[in-house]
Image (cartoon, rainbow, N blue to C red):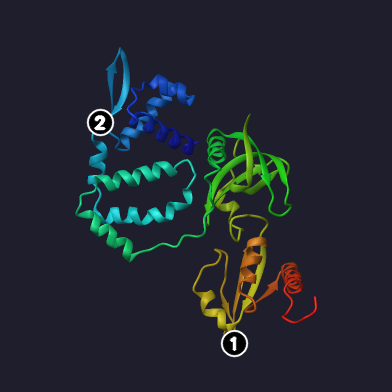
Amino acid sequence: MRNAEVIRQWKILKTIEAGRWTSASALAREHGVTERTIRRDLEALQEAGFPLYDERKDGRKVWRLIEGYQQRLTQSFTLSELAALFFSRNMLSFLGGAPFAQDLESAFAKISEALPERSLPYLERIQELFSARPDPWKDYSRKQDVIAGLIDGILHQKQVRIAYYSFHSKRTKDYTVDPYRLVYYRGGLYLYARAHDYGEVRTFAVERVQTMEILDEGFEIPADFSPSEYARSAFGIAGGEAQTVELLFRPSMASYIRERVWHESQRMEEDEDGSVRLPMEVAPGFELKAWVKSFLPDVQVLQPAALREEISRELAEARSAFPPPGSAR
């Protein structure tokens, strides 16, 4: 439950930052934990360097932050650290609509206001030297309640009922799930959750969650579950049963293929004619098929046969949908 502690401590810090005269007992009631837990949280925040202190007000002990600590915080940054922060801002744009988005914008605004004037020209030049082209991102501005609810279910290990629209079946279906982890991948948020209907972990795209409800029933994450292990077989975001997939790329594409690590299980083998073989242990799903087709006609699927036949069938359907100019339909 380490993640739950971190989020709770972040919320405690936000409450105290807002200037509220907050007692440990009030914080305990707000977060549904004991005062002893809150005191441990406050001690952890102090050890992390946040200048918290307690004082008496109206006969009770309340917690405050030392005034002016925000200014001292921004002044402690070096120019190179500030440049790195502002450069990373572009990479965080995908969080639009997510619970932390407003806090990020507020943080950058405060840093900008606190910077000495001599720093601003330097940072403007940095933006001219470096640019970032993030993947197309998904708009979560209308999914704030869904994301917040999923985070709550993950942190408190509560089952969640979701109405989910399937890209493949084009239908909306209700699922009861144990939410394990939210994952960011190529501009989108995905939920790793055990779906009760299937008895296994599935991947859900957050933007396709139409509605969600937190249930009273709790769950335990299996001790042997690892998000990285679940995704190890994925060529993209969705896991599954790994198979040996072997591709053959023409010499004209070989140097491009050699320049990248496409999957951690890949083995690069070069033939005498300059072509490249790429065996991998992956789940042959939608993302793999799309990636393979993007290299046509410079790639062949050597195995598995089922993947080769499926791509061949889809290409035949595409040819019928896009006949050559002047041909009869």
Q: Please tell me which residue lies in front, 215 or 281.
A: 215
In percent of the image, x 50 and y 60: which residue is there? 135
Q: Is residue 54 left or right of residue 169?
A: left
Q: Secondary structure at mark 1?
A: loop
Q: Is residue 286 left or right of residue 74?
A: right
Q: Residue 132: percent from the left, percent from the top? A: 41, 62
Q: Residue 107: percent from the left, percent from the top? A: 35, 44
In percent of the image, x 60 and y 52: which residue is there? 230
In percent of the image, x 44 and y 44: which residue is there? 101
In percent of the image, x 37 and y 33: which residue is there? 13
Would you say residue 199 is visible in this rendering?
yes
Which quadrant: the C terminus?
A: bottom right
Mark identifier at residue 273: 1
Q: Residue 106: percent from the left, percent from the top? A: 36, 42
Relative to 18, does residue 195 appear above or below in the rendering? Answer: below
Badge 1 density bin: few <14, some 14–19, many ≥20, Cα 10 Å: few
C-alpha distance separating marks 2 and 1: 70 Å
Q: Nearer the viewer, mark 2 or mark 1?
A: 2
Q: Quadrant of residue 159?
A: top right
Among numbered discs 2 and 1, the one appearing first in the sequence = 2
